Amino acid sequence: MKLVRLIANLGYGSRKQVAAMFRQGRITAADGAVLYADDQVEHDQVRVDGDPLDPPQGLVLMLHKPVGVTCSTRDPGRLVYDLLPPRYRLRSPALSTVGRLDRETSGLLLLTDDGALLHRIISPRSKLSKVYEVALAQPLRGGEAERFASGTLMLESEQTPLLPASLEIVTPTQARLTLHEGRYHQVRRMFAAVGNHVVALHRSRVGGLALDGLEEGRWRRLDPPDIASVFGGDA
Ligand code: URA
């Protein structure tokens, strides 16, 4: 791919704007030699204003999503993309969230521009586990764990029962719920189905990957071993 297109696809500007950056000598090789729009150079050898080019397609990030930001590219209010470098929102192929967390849910959110990986993670067939820490308005009554594990619980306006989920009781109003699917507002609707109400929700784990001390609002790139860990260590 010609450099001008590669750099434009990474969100640095339109092709016209990137062509102007070439003319201004802002695109160079690692040794400082000025590059031209038609050059074909190894990705890691390119510098923009002296900085290495953003990563190529195949980018995978994990973000510790705070409450109050939305998993969308255009909703009003704060978006998860506002927590990333602004160029990341303009990349082509697009950097998409891997599923969604509600605006009022915090925790581990993956983003990628790798469509095959995204589908592999969210596919119902992968049955990847997702762990949620839940704070409840009412004390648990007993019996919730059995109902969630039964594989027969139906949510309102759904056609098929939920897959068995495992509930670990931490305190009478705090629980850890492990799901193997991802339906709309699933955790909140499950607790509503047993007469309770979720007051705070946090996702701590996706497959074998945990936040591991990543601070709220911060993100980091995942490398191949991290990505493998999403699929590894998972029952
Ligand atoms: N279940 C919910 O209800 N909300 C989320 O954000 C994720 C799972």
Image: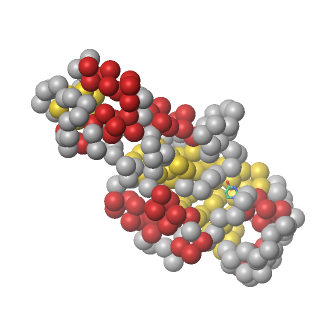
Query: 56 left or right of 136?
Result: left
Q: Is residue 69 visible?
A: no
What residue appears at the point 31 percent right and 22 percent down from the top-left corner?
21
Q: Quadrant of residue 32?
A: top left
Camera-nearest residue between 62 and 46: 46
The image shows residue 177, relative to residue 17, as above or below, that is: below
User: What colouring method underlies this structural image?
Assistant: secondary structure
Camera-nearest residue between 218 and 126: 126
Task: Give x and y (percent) for residue 166.
Answer: 66, 74
What residue appears at the point 24 percent right and 27 percent down from the top-left corner?
27
What residue appears at the point 32 percent right and 25 percent down from the top-left corner?
19
Query: 18 left or right of 91?
Result: left
Task: Give x and y (percent) for residue 198.
Answer: 77, 55
The image shows residue 95, relative to residue 123, as above or below, that is: above
What residue appears at the point 27 percent right and 37 percent down from the top-left corner?
3
Camera-nearest residue between 230 and 85: 85
Task: Give x and y (percent) for residue 233.
Answer: 44, 72
In which quadrant will I find the N terminus?
A: top left
Count of number-bearing discs: 0
